[in-house]
Amino acid sequence: MTALAARTHDTVTFHAVELFKEASALQRSGIDIISLGVGEPDFTAAPLVVETMERAARAGLSGYSSPAGIPELREAIAGFYANHLGVKLDPSRVIVTSGASGALMLAAMALVNPGDEVLMPDPCYPPNRNFISAAGGCTKLIPTTPENRYQLSCADIEQHWGPATRGVLIASPSNPTGTSIPRDELDRIIRAVHARNGFVMMDEIYLSLSYNGERQSALALDDNVIILNSFSKYFNMTGWRLGWMVVPPHMVAPIEKMAASLVICAPTLAQHGAIACFAPESLAIFEQRRQAFEQRRDYLVPALEEIGIRVPVKPDGAFYVYGDISAHSNDSSVFSSSLLHGARVAAVPGLDFGPTHARHTMRFSYTTGLDRLEQAVLRMKNYLS
């Protein structure tokens, strides 16, 4: 057989996807599975977004765009920051990408040299490590605690920064915990990294799905942060494969040059449709859906606690609950499988997100309606009893 590159063996397995495949197979066999697994909203694109994309298709606007994206979409994204995320932003700094994954790939390629080390919290979103390794770097996972909301602190940066460290990749709110970094601590983290001439990659994919107070980008703290974002979560467009990044001015031309070769451009029809995300009628829909996610969180957190799944930190954003299953099992992978086959509920084992809390934690996603969440909790309660 043809020999494969070493990275095919080193790539971290994304267990949420493997669980999704197994749950889907059970559903195809006629078994009703309630998924609290994959982080995909049950809402779909807003009607005006679909209509705008269809008009673009009929008008023949399906050719390549510039590598950085359609100018009108870049301007609309910059306007969203000014009106909703507390930052005035030059549209020229916005680069439209093929999902947040495309943004992370380009950021890693632009910033990480072979052998460079990037600091990340444990737990964190597993594919992040794969993008760093694909660029030739390596990830150093730093154990976190509930006391720090499962997030990195400035003290962590100071303690773990080494000769090979090049930067940090952090998310606020986070996947899998749904927790945010307090603003004063985030400011200290950014200052500590920049004092060491490092970069800060900031995942703000779930920023607009925050439930506590004002939503403000990290760019309001420091203009020299690389922002990663997506249309998948708040805008409910997972399969449209559209995201964006905001970079300092000196990074625009190099990243656009790489994008032209590596991806040519993000899906053009999706870009045309996404312009309508920022129309007032679409934003009103997204806000109603954000409130629906908040209601689901407020149901699921105490409901899990009642069946013995402790929630050490209440999530303040995204649509995940990071639960402690120690009362029921000391192996989250085994427990996840038993819930899937015994209770017909899919939830992701902690192994996906890093080793520190892997055996006693699971991620429960509330991306399904309240009625199905109630059924899921009842199924788990009956099974566990």
Image: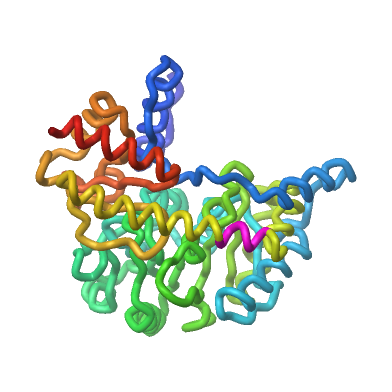
**Magenta span: chief secondary structure:** helix
Residue 197 visible in image: yes
Q: Position of residue 362 (x, y in %)?
A: 25, 45
Residue at position x 64%, y 71% in the image: 80
User: Which residue: 26% across, 36% down?
Assistant: 378
Q: Is residue 213 left or right of residue 121?
A: right
Nearer to me, 288 or 90: 288
Q: Quadrant of residue 313?
A: bottom left
Q: Picture quarter containing residue 179? A: bottom left
Instruction: Examine the structure image and report whether residue 131 is included in the region drawn in magenta.
Output: no
Quadrant of the image for the N terminus? top left
Q: Residue at x 56, y 62 (%)?
A: 287
Q: Is residue 189 above or below residue 320?
A: below
Q: Quadrant of residue 328?
A: top left
Is residue 10 visible to us here?
no
The span shown in magenta is 282-287
Where is the C terminus found, in terms of image quarters?
A: top left
Q: Give x and y (percent) for residue 146.
A: 20, 64
Q: Nearer the viewer, residue 205 or 195?
A: 205
Q: Position of residue 102 (x, y in %)?
A: 57, 52
Image-based side of 173 in relation to 275, left or right: left
